[in-house]
Image (cartoon, helix red, strand yellow):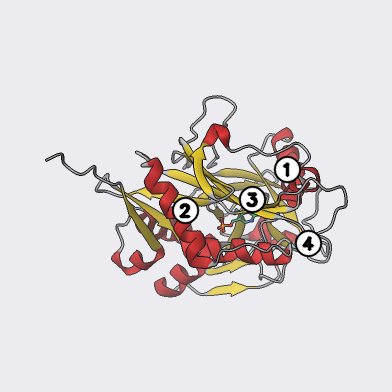
Amino acid sequence: MSKLPDTTMTSPMLEYAFFEGRIVPFSEAKVSIGTHALQYGTGAFAGIRGYLDQDGETINIFRLPDHTTRLLNSGKLLRCDLPFDRDSLAQVIVDLVEKNAPQSDIYIRPFIYKANVQLTPRLKGMHDELSVYMMSIGDYLDTRGVKASVSSWSRLPDHAIPGRGKITGSYINAALAKDEAEEKGVDEAILLDQHGHVAEGSACNLFLVRDGVLITAPITGDILEGITRRTILMFAKDLGIPTQEREIDRSELYLAEEAFFCGTGVQVAPIASIDGRPVGNGHVPGPISKQIGEVFFNTVRGKDPRYAHLLTPVRRKVAAPAD
Ligand code: PMP
């Protein structure tokens, strides 16, 4: 299973962060313990990957404008008032990548939040801020496949906390499901929605293959509107693989020929078993997951010119030669 780095061990944090309007050392980007977002979860975040290009000099940020758009949409749900649009927010991120001049793949974490020290859990009339930090990250994909299990925790319904945005407070739902999965000895949870339909993983979307059709839950199914999910639907269309966005029953998990998780963190992660039952013939990745995974990894590494438009290249600045 692809994992984000455990930052309690060694800090892969890059040197600079964007904090309250300017670039500062990461160690100086600090908020008060009374911060509204810390107390009530009134923030939203993005998780974006930057991949080192084959040239060793360029970081290719994957679908940056899509991530900044979704972050601003999450901010809209939280009634945030920020002086950024899709492009100016993307520029803040590009400037910070340039400043940090990473030598390896990175994970970028922009965060918008209610910054007041204020006791009432409310959204309107608060002071909103933006911060961005980034860390180096490796490619932890386990090709043996992920073990998954259906969680006893349900995915939050849209009418409780909207899950289509990446709202900080809602991640307690993901954390409860993830812990339960790990206690059971598997890698990842599959959450069902309030009606018992399959929604997604704890921090990733889910695809199944049945009768050669690639199936995923609809965006009205209490899932995060995943950017990798949307990308995979596009790849499948281009590869001539039929797709369906529809409600998925739990029992279909046990009948699928193939299944995989996808997301910025997990990338494309084939699932080997669900609730102890092998997926398909138990050999991963299956043919469709393999095809999708290949297009995905070629794209993010800048090796597929058809999808070059999905990357924002940031070149490391070369110091001007002295006269
Ligand atoms: N669902 C949840 C709950 C997530 O946190 C993530 C990770 N952002 C995903 C799905 C996958 O979304 P994306 O492909 O945009 O990273």
Q: Nearer the viewer, mark 1 or mark 2?
A: 2
Label 3 to label 4: alpha-carbon separation: 30 Å
The amino acid type, in three-letter code, at marker 2 is Ile
* Marks 3 and 2, the one that precedes in the sequence: 2
The amino acid type, in three-letter code, at marker 3 is Ala
The amino acid type, in three-letter code, at marker 4 is Gly
Q: Tell me if I can see residue 165 in this picture.
A: yes
Label 1 to label 4: alpha-carbon separation: 30 Å
State whether label 4 is within 8 Å of ligand 1.
no
Residue at point 27% right, 48% down? 54
- Residue at the spot of label 2: 93
Mark identifier at residue 203: 3
- Residue at the spot of label 4: 125
Residue at point 43% right, 56% down? 293
Label 4 to label 2: alpha-carbon separation: 26 Å
Q: Quadrant of the C terminus?
A: top left
Label 3 to label 1: alpha-carbon separation: 9 Å
Label 3 to label 2: alpha-carbon separation: 22 Å
* CA neighbours of label 4 inside 10 A, class few (<14), some (14 to 19), many (20+): few
Q: In the image shown, does 179 or 227 lie closer to the viewer? A: 227
Indicate the quadrant where residue 197 lies.
bottom right
Q: Secondary structure at mark 1?
A: helix
Left or right, 176 with reference to 89? right
* Marks 1 and 2, the one that precedes in the sequence: 2
State whether label 1 is within 8 Å of ligand 1.
no
